[in-house]
Image (spheres, rainbow, N blue to C red):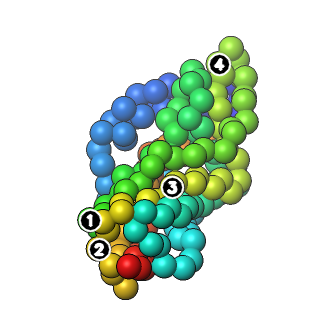
Amino acid sequence: MTSIPRICCVLLALVLAPAAAAAGPRPQGRLGDAVVAARLILDGGPLAPGDATVARIELTPAAGWHLYGPERGDAGAPPDVAWTLPRGLHAGAIDFPAARRVVAHGLTTYDYDGRTTLRIRIVAAPGAPARRHARVVANVSWVACSNVCAPGGVTLRGWFAVAR
């Protein structure tokens, strides 16, 4: 990436990141939506009250695009997930993989190129009611950058079984 587009990308990400984080679920059709493929993967088997499992969210930016990691850099915002879970299920913090440190023109960022998997621990409270299909919804947001930066997001859905 040349210096001017990289600097513009960094500045745009700094401006957009707070708004993207506060906006909540986003409508489809933005550039950032189109350049990142997202998939929710729920580990199988019924979840017993008091047990935990891991939900994984795979984010794959298109060639030439990157996402930002959670490490504090000079620009960017990491992907975020806002969950809607049935009573008795609780999501933990995102377990991010290590991001690649990038230094360009005096600015440091932490980037993900290619497929990135976010891991989130889902816990069934001890008194969680039994359900055959406990629907979970993950509203995922990100800032994707190439020669420009663009916020994006998607709503992913899946189901858990909660056993007694």
Name the element at disc 3: strand
Residue 81 visible (yes or no): yes
Q: Earlier in the sequence, mark 3 or mark 2?
A: 3
> Do residues under tags 3 and 4 come within 8 Å of each other at their CB atoms?
no
Q: Which residue is mark 2?
A: 129
In front of the other: 136 or 139: 136
Q: Earlier in the sequence, mark 1 or mark 3?
A: 1
Task: Give the amino acid type for the residue marked by disc 1 in the picture.
Answer: Arg
Q: Which residue is mark 1?
A: 87
Work out which quarter of the rendered image holds the N terminus and state it: top right
Residue 75's x, y, as percent?
54, 26
Q: Nearer the viewer, mark 3 or mark 2?
A: 2
Task: Give the amino acid type for the residue marked by disc 4 in the picture.
Answer: Leu
> Which label belongs to residue 121?
3
Residue 86's x, y, as percent?
29, 67
> Do residues under tags 1 and 2 come within 8 Å of each other at their CB atoms?
yes
Rendered residue at 29%/44% (across/down) = 23
Q: CA distance from mark 1 to mark 3?
A: 16 Å
Q: CA distance from mark 2 to mark 4?
A: 50 Å
Task: Give the amino acid type for the residue marked by disc 2 in the picture.
Answer: Pro
**Residue farthest to the top?**
106
User: In the displayed structure, would residue 66 be above or below residue 16?
Assistant: below
Residue 11's x, y, as percent?
50, 25
Q: Earlier in the sequence, mark 2 or mark 4?
A: 4
Residue 143's x, y, as percent?
50, 43
Rendered residue at 56%/35% (across/down) = 70
Q: CA distance from mark 3 to mark 2?
A: 19 Å
Q: CA distance from mark 3 to mark 4?
A: 33 Å
Q: Which residue is mark 4?
A: 107
